[in-house]
Amino acid sequence: MAEQILVIDDEKAILDLCQMILRSRGYDVRTAQSGAEGLEQIQAQPPALVLLDYMMPMMDGMSVLMQIKQNHPDVYVIMFTGKGSERVAVEVMKAGASDYVLKPFNNHDLLDRIESVLKFRRIEMINRSLEQERAQLQQEIQAWNRELELRVAEKTRELEQAHNEMVQAEKLATVGHLSAGMAHEIRNPLNSIGLFAQLLSAGLDQNDELAEYPDKILKEIDRIDDILLKLLAASKQHKTESGEISLADALHDVTDLFRPQFRQQGVNVDLYLQPVPELVADRDEIVQIFTNLFVNALQAMPEGGLLSVEMESHDGRIFIEVNDTGNGITQENLSKVFDPFFTTKSKGTGFGLSVVLRIVKNYHGSIRVSSEPGQGTSFYLEFPLKSPTENTASVLA
Ligand SMILES: Nc1ncnc2c1ncn2[C@@H]1O[C@H](COP(=O)(O)OP(=O)(O)OP(=O)(O)O)[C@@H](O)[C@H]1O
Ligand SMILES: [Mg+2]
């Protein structure tokens, strides 16, 4: 389609002449006899080029030029200037005109100038659309980059978590091996020490001031034996004889077992258990999880408080939350509570939560903890509903 040219001049003769010359060259030409009329036409339908007279009554060419450049930067302007004045030429070029032609003009010269301005305009328009395309592509690339960064960050987090879990599992395995062997070895000589202490006790005169020591020895032996039994329990192998069990039943049983202690310590218990499918698991192991969590909660609430348990199931998983209003865990200790041997209690062994973690992992579940020191602690457990044996089978298949 031919480019449109608008001629704005107060002289009718110039308008007719331009129209004739430009039409003969195939341009689509319109005319306006005043600045105001010309601006109206530009507003209604912007042409590619305006031939604009500098000297016009009413609104002069300079103010028309400035308005065109301000509102329609894509409309290019060639100024007709009267007697060749350098000052006017510089002024119109500064104001944004693409060229100027001295009146009276030579037809060929006018056409040459028009053609070169239009050529220049076409190149500039292509450049501009390329610029826009480039800017858009840059924006898209930036968006991709951001998306990529997010994905990398997410993958890094996942990898870190997997790494942490692996480290935990390795620690547990090491403890398992070591403790099983050690516990057996230590219990034999310990038994002998106990026996000798008893013999000593029997042989001593009960009024002797040394008579109380064998009893103290026996008490300490009991404590060591207790720790060793816990060590053995912590290193136990995962039980494979599993059946379908009701987690709600297990939770009620453990709660009943602890009821006298709850009452004595002034701890209220709330269970919010939604019906959930049965879990393929070993009942003793599940009981062990809740026992350890409840003992910790009790120990964290010596002055009483509230223990609440919530359970629900969706998306093929079971979710359990165990909350207490106890003394909480400091930020620094939060990442260590599942480590074997980590304890803040004078008589603790630090096994409770590592055993819980081992069992949860055996069922392909997960456990998280959050805590607010002085406010309380929450443990979040998740179990997939598929049985571990099914999981193994699907991995092997
Ligand atoms: N509910 C809780 N409230 C406050 N601190 C807790 C809670 N549960 C665990 N902890 C912290 O985590 C540590 C480790 O707990 P874990 O059950 O593994 O060992 P323990 O209770 O110290 O000893 P054990 O359970 O072997 O007798 C605890 O010593 C305690 O500092
Ligand atoms: Mg414990």
Image: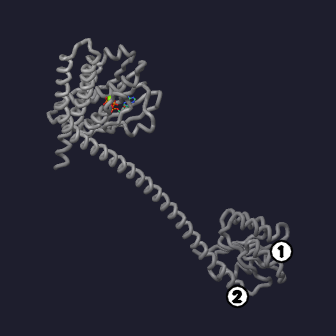
Q: Earlier in the sequence, mark 2 or mark 1?
A: 1
Residue 342's place in the image compared with 218, above or below, is: below
x, y percent for residue 366: 31, 38
Q: Residues within 10 Å of mark 2 (few under 14, many from 20)?
A: few
x, y percent for residue 346: 37, 28
Residue type, numbered disc 2: His
Which residue is at a point 76% across and 67% down the rendered structure image?
A: 66
Q: Secondary structure at mark 2?
A: helix
x, y percent for residue 84: 83, 83
Q: Secondary structure at mark 1?
A: loop
Classify the position of the N terminus by image quarter: bottom right
Q: Quadrant of residue 231?
A: top left
Q: Residues within 10 Å of mark 1 (few under 14, many from 20)?
A: some
Residue type, numbered disc 1: Met
Mark 2 highlights which residue?
A: 108
Is residue 206 or residue 215 the one in the foreground? 206
Q: Is mark 1 within 8 Å of ligand 1?
A: no
Residue 104's place in the image compared with 93, above or below, is: below
Which residue is at a point 79% across and 78% down the rendered structure image?
A: 90
Mark 1 highlights which residue?
A: 55
Q: Is residue 317 left or right of residue 150?
A: left
Q: Is residue 393 left or right of residue 80?
A: left
Q: Quadrant of residue 126?
A: bottom right
Which residue is at a point 76% across and 74% down the rendered structure image?
A: 94
